[in-house]
Every structure is written in C-alpha cells, then in structure tokens.
Image: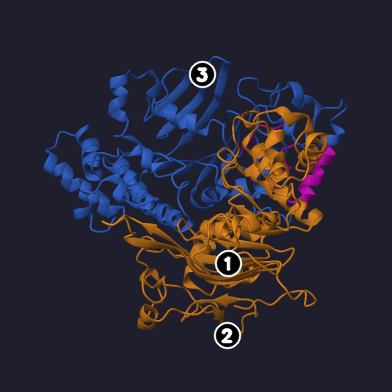
Amino acid sequence: MTTASTEPLITEPLLQVRDVRKYFPVGRGLLGGALAEVKAVDGVSLDVQRGETFGLVGETGCGKSTLARCITGLYPVTSGHVVLDGTELTGLSRRRLRPLRRQMQMIFQDPYGSLNPRRRVGSIIGDPFAVHGVASGAERRRRVQELMSLVGLNPEHYNRFPAEFSGGQRQRIGVARALALHPELIVCDEPVSALDVSIQAQIINLLEDLQDELKLTYIFIAHDLNVVRHVSDRVAVMYLGHIVEVARSEDLYTLPRHPYSAALLSASSVADPDEAEQKQRIILRGDVPSPVNPPSGCPFHPRCPKAQDKCVVEPPPLERKDDDPVDHLAACHFPVQPGEVLSQP
Amino acid sequence: MSLLEVRDLEVAFHTADGTVRAVDRVSFTIDGGQTLAVVGESGSGKSVTALTLLGLNRGAEVAGTVLFDGVDLLAMDDEAMRAVRGNQIAMVFQDPLSSLHPLYRVGWQIEEAILAHRDVPRQQARARAVELLDLVGIPEPARRVDDYPHQFSGGMRQRAMIAMALALDPRLLIADEPTTALDATVQAQILDLIRRLQGELGTALIIITHDLGIVADLADDVIVMYAGRVVERADRRTLYYHPHHPYTVGLLRSVPGSVARAARLQPIPGQPPSLIRLPSGCRFHPHCEFVMDRCVDHDPPELRVLGGLHHGSACWLPGEMVGTDDDTHRRRSAYAGAHRQTLVGSGSTAVP
C-alpha cells in the first residue's frame, strides 16, 4: 500500500506497517497443540505520517486493539514488519526493543483498570523514568509534577492514590504517564469511551493541545465514529482483521466506498434531529463471522448487500477507486457509487 | 389522562457518608405510544428515577406520586407492584449478560416471565417465546429458544431481553441505556427494532441514555437531568435547535458532530457535584459560564421558555436566549456579566 504524503518534503512516514498478521492459537488438541487459530489481524499495511492523527475504527473483534498492541510491541507479530522512524521493530529482542519503546506509548481505555490502585500517582507517572533509568529522586519528582501540570492535574496531588481521582482525572494521569519520555507516537486505545460526554470533550481537547505543543503523532482507536471524525486526519476502517478502507476523514465520511464503511457510518447516530431524519440507515443482517474460520474471498461478503460471485472467491485488494483522491483506498470489487442507496440483501 | 404521570418525585439514600439526594422534585408525563428520553451523565439521577418507577430500589426514601393509568405506584404494596412490573411496565437493562441468568435456557427465562403473570400451560408460553424471538429477529427461533445466554452474541442477548420485556404486551417499556454496550451497527439494529415494535404495538417508551445521538433519532420529548434535577424539558427539535439551559447547551457543544458544529469542542468545566453536598442555589452554578449573583443562592424554578409550548428550563437567564450558536453565547455572556457584581467562582477555564 502506498500513501501519499501531504507535505512532499517529508518522504518517510513515522510508522510503516507491512502485511502484519497476528494469529492466536485456540483450544488444545490431544498432544497440546492448538486446534485452530484466531486470525485477529490478517495482513494489515499502513503508513502513519509525522504529526498526523490516524484513526482506526471498527467493531468489537475487528482486530483494531490487537493491531495497536502489535505496533507498540506488546504482542509479537506472527508475521510482517513494523518500522518506526526507519528502524525495524519486529524480531528485536526485548532488550534491544526497550530503548525504542520510549518513542511509542499507549493510552488505554479503562482509567480504572490501567492504574495500580495501591500506588501513588506520582510514582505511577514516574514509572517510565524509573524503567528507562532517566531521572531519579528530586529530579524525577520535579519532572512528574511538570507533567501533571501539563495535563491539567494539580501537582500538589503527587502523593494521592488513583481512587482519589475522578474518571476524567485518571485519564489525565494515563496521558501524563504516556508523555513522560517525550514519545513521538502515542497509540490511544479508546481513550474517551469510558467517560461522560462533558469529560470526554475535556480529554479530546487536551490531546489536541498536546499534539500541537509537542508535535505528537497519534493512532486513535475508537468505536465512536463522531469522535474519530473529529480528531483524525485520516481514518482506516477494519473488519475481521483487514483494513477494508482508508482515506482522509472528510473523504471517508463524504463518500465511503466500501459497503461496510457505508453501513458503519450510516449506523452511527448524530446529535442533530434533521440529520438523523435524513439518514439512510443501512441495517446489516446477522453478526460478524468468527475470525477462527473467516469467510472466503472478501471477509464482508456474507453480510454485504452488494456481494456477487466474485466476492466469494477473490479477496479484493486495497486500492484506489475511480476518481477518488490518491490516498483514498478501498478493498472492494464493487465499490459504492456516489448517490447509490444500498438496499437490504 | 397521561399513561404515566410523575409528580415531584424525590429519592434519597442514607449512606455512611451522608444522605445522597439522587432525585429531587422530578416531574414528567408520557402518553401512550410516545417516546420520552431522559438524558444525563453519570450521577444525574436518570437510572434511579427509572428504578423507582418500578419499585426496584429498596432502602431508598421515596416521596412524590407516580400515577400509572391513574393509580399511584408508590402507594402500592409489594404484591400489587409485582402484578404491574413486567406485566404492564417492563424494563430493558443496559447489560444483557448480567440480566439473563447464565444457567437457564433463554427460552425458559422468557417462559418464566409469561408464567409469572399468566395462567397458561407451559407449552403455550413456549410457543409465545418462539414467536417473540422471531419478532425481535433471532434467526431460527424454534432452535435458538433452547440456547443458553452464552451461545448468543451481545446483540442477540439484547434482543432476547427486549423479547422478554415485550412478552406480556406492556403498555410502558423503560429502556436504560439499551445499546450502550453494543457496537454501532448492532445499535442501529436494536434501535430499528425498538422503533418498529413501538409502531406495531403502540407501547410507550422511556429511554434513558447519555447519548445525544440516540435521542435525536428516537425521542418525541426530552428531559435533561443534572444532579438529580430536571434542568430542561422540550420536544426533541426544540431541545436541539433552541436549547435554553446552559447545561444542555454545554452538552451539545461538547459532543462532536452535534447541531453545535464546533470546530473545537467546548467542554463543561469540572465535574458534576457530589449529591451529598450539593451546591447552594442553582446546582449547575459552580460550572456555569453564565453564573449571575442570584444563581448562587436562589435555586431557579422551572420556567416556561418563550416560544415553546412545553419548553421549560430551570435557569435565570432570559427566556429568549436559546440556541447553541456563538451569537447567542455572546448575548448570554453579556447579560450574565451585567448581572454579576460579586466575584463568584465561574469555572470557565479552571481544571479540577
């Protein structure tokens, strides 16, 4: 897959993902071998440019969180390559990977589950300094307090426990911890899903401000399509371990080419009664098939209103359709046309 | 007469830390076949309100009246309430996995709901269970009726819950965040189902949600709750296009893709107050950009907003200042500035 850069001077993307696969063994046979594999990520390639926010959307089980964990090295990949800033990360030993990990951090969904309840906030945020042996003692404390004010926490709360903070404040703690080592890339995995709407907006604004200030690059995973549209420069749609479409956000939301993207976007609700009334909902039938035994050909064909015989046998490549912008790619044999109304199968 | 009329409902819980005033003087009505959305964030009292209607919060101190078809539900004893609950008023909860018993077959659980209220043979209840599963779009209902809950996907479990809720043709269905745990396409399936069934069966629906997108899609009327109070009520279009209360405006300006169309989201600063130590005056005043002197010690009653027939707002700002646009915002600011002599804690940029 090639992706055009908006700024022609910068040729090399910050992150290159090439044909990454991640299969998990399931079940145990008589001799202890795996009976089958869950194909959580099944051949994903993408580029993330410096300074952009790359959105990743899809529904439960589509592989977006697994992909994020493969990128940050939390899961070893089954095959494929992850290249950060020109350095290949796949296949490195843990020891050699560790210094590179400083450039990549993660923010998690659950601000309750991702902070150790028995440790003080100052020491949680200071962890990256300890792990990488960067700063200690009074210097560490000073830097942690700097981070706390950067994300809008009161530095005097250094010695408090996570339980003394609200959900929104806990998410700020997670952000501060992720920023500690001046990473280039932050993978945000559903960072606002667990928060109330008014708090959600505070965190989104914080992430945007930090991006401007610190020139950060984000991979932003969320199931709320309105949030993703708001924050992302480009968005990739995942289904059953595959990227089925990738485009600049406005292009994707204006004319989704893949029928799954179209259905997903049509299903998302907007806080605007007029728009809600005009919306042509595409109601998909049935459930997502099992990634243990994914469908042949195009993974979406059993639920697709446009599926034909070709879709059953031939997996569609991710490519540009018709006169779309060069960076708008879709994996579909029969892409949605402008003005087309998808009928129920 | 309305199907349901709630008047001055108050619910308090006594805890070790003090009394939690979860619901305070809440009133609303709903007619047959109508959809009322109750919108609010965590701790606004929206779910407690729903549970109270069904007599499902033991240990709470409840005051007010809840007239269902003219009969006060709050005055009923347990046995009389059991005859109403599930039968005339049914509820769909947020989490279908913890609301279905994991060790009983789905169909059996629906049959039990029927047999609890109707004197019919089990065979007939079973036939009805299959019919209901078919109605809510479970494929091969005659076979799936014998599945256990874990054999159903999340969306199917929520469908099964809806089937159970509809088993006895209730006149009022209360759905508490019915799609929050579900993916977008599944949510669309469930909302489509609810809308279709409501049209076919004429059931009244109270939908409790924090999702302003669902409300824009489904509701006839909306009430917005904050810290146990109704702060604004209106029909759907009025609420989105001509909101009056700064909290409602704040909600609309803080969600992406809403009518407010903000390039940058405008969050409501701070967090909702503790329900044990509520602020004086208007409960929203510590976080309100437009706080005025009188807001600090005078709790605004719900006043009719100009132009809307059933549009009410518990705010001291003039009734004509409605909308989410920047121009109205400036007019509100100017008005509030002119009515603010003493320095009060407006949390315009403060971070907790």
Give percent across and percent down for residue A14. Answer: 70, 67
Q: Which residue is mark 3?
A: B13
Q: Colour of chain B?
A: blue
Q: Colour of chain A?
A: orange
Which chain is disc 2 placed on? A
Q: CA distance from mark 2 to mark 1?
A: 19 Å
Residue sticking out furthest to the bottom: A322
What colour scheme governs how the chains and residues are painted in the rendered image of this protein? by chain
Residue at 71% across / 54% down in the picture?
B262
**Residues tagged by mark 2 and mark 3 found on one chain of the structure:** no
Give percent across and percent down for residue A204. Answer: 68, 50
Residue at 51% across / 32% down in the picture?
B28
Q: Is residue A275 magenta?
A: no
Give percent across and percent down for residue A252. Answer: 60, 70
Query: Amino acid under label 3?
Result: Phe
Q: Nearer the viewer, residue B36 or B92?
A: B92
Q: Which residue is mark 1?
A: A236
Left-right relation of B221 to B199: right
Q: Which residues are magenta?
A: B312-335
Residue A136: tell me if it is visible.
yes
Which label is found at residue A322? 2
**Residues tagged by mark 1 and mark 3 found on one chain of the structure:** no
Q: Measured along the vertical axis of the image, is residue B69 above or below residue B321?
A: above
Query: Amino acid under label 2?
Result: Asp
